[in-house]
Image: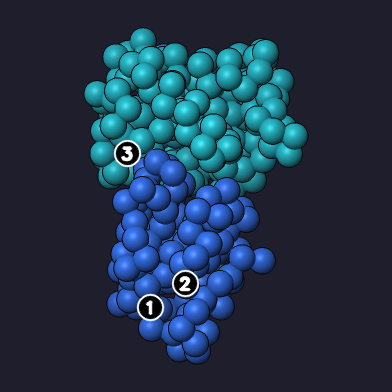
Amino acid sequence: MIQDLIKVENCVIVESVEDWKRAIHLALEPLVKDGCCTDEYEKAVLKMTDQYGPYYVLTDHMALIHASSEAGVSKTQLACTILKEPVAFTEEKNDVRCLVALCAVDHTQHMSGIVAVSSIFGDEDKEQQILASTSPQEIYDLFIENAEM
Amino acid sequence: MAKIRKIMCCCGSGLGSSLMVQMNIEKALKNLGIEGVEVDHTSLSEISVRSADLFVVGKDIAPRIKDYPRVVVLNKIMSMKELTEKLEQAFAIEGDEIHIAR
């Protein structure tokens, strides 16, 4: 159930970030605070970034910040941070404004979360809608509305 | 038509884009009227060339499986249009090797 995967408190709107590392830290912060994962998870994301590049930038404007399930994860959960000013992960991937953080205990429990991410960011209108959110509730509602296949 | 019974979607973690692509492939195959194909997702570290008949990956990790004989590479990982076109091409190939990247 999508309601078990995301909380209004974990939807955040932020003015800007210094750089992509800070963006990753900020995106994962709600999940760490909630005890869903530890700091190890952030380290795992950074380590995988060294290996693959920013593999989590999935559209021009969205990054799905995640690592594998082994890296200090105790509960499957999502968080969403909207940046009013874009952050650059590389020269090409320089217009990211939405950070969806995901930690997952296995390969399937977060299915409805991925359905939501896929239907919001696979649709330009919906993507613009989430980027224009002015409150955490708006972000949360979009996830809930779009979690059905 | 190329015999493709199992498609494996792979990404670095095995739970982000690979799961998304799996769901999109299932949708695309339905739209294309292709049946009897198993689709799964996993991480790069868990696959071997024998894991599936066709591998679908994003362009970021494509270099890691460049020696595999049957690979579809997606430039825009979330694009249903690109995915559907490339799957259609893959299933239409007569020979044993499938390399669809552009």
Any part of residue A33 in sight? yes
Q: Nearer the viewer, mark 2 or mark 1?
A: 2
Q: Are marks 2 and 1 in contact (CB under 8 Å)?
A: yes
Mark 1 vs mark 3: give the one in front.
1
Q: Residue at x 36, y 19 (%)?
A: A40
Q: Amino acid at mark 2?
A: Arg
Residue A29 place in picture, x, y as percent: 44, 14
> Separation of disc 1 and disc 3 at Cα?
28 Å
User: Looking at this rendering, what residue extends furthest in the front direction?
Assistant: B67
Residue A41 location, x and y as percent?
38, 23
Residue topped by disc 3? A110
- Mark 2 and mark 1 on one chain: yes
Q: Residue at x 58, y 15 (%)?
A: A22
Q: Chain of mark 2?
A: B
Residue to which mark 2 is pinned? B70
Instruction: Say if residue A147 shows up in the picture.
Output: no
Q: From the rendered image, report the letter of the chain displayed in blue.
A: B
B77 left or right of A15 in image? left
Task: Provide residue B43's location: percent of width, then percent of height.
Answer: 37, 48
Give SS at disc 2.
strand
Q: Is residue B11 left or right of residue A59?
A: left
Q: Residue furthest right?
A: A91
Q: Is residue A28 above or below residue B51?
A: above
Which chain is assigned cyan? A
Rendered image quadrant of residue A102: top left
Q: Which residue is mark 1?
A: B4
In the foreground, A71 or A130: A71
Rendered residue at 47%/40% (across/down): A117
Residue A66, placed above or below residue A15? below
Q: Nearer the viewer, residue B30 or B94?
A: B94
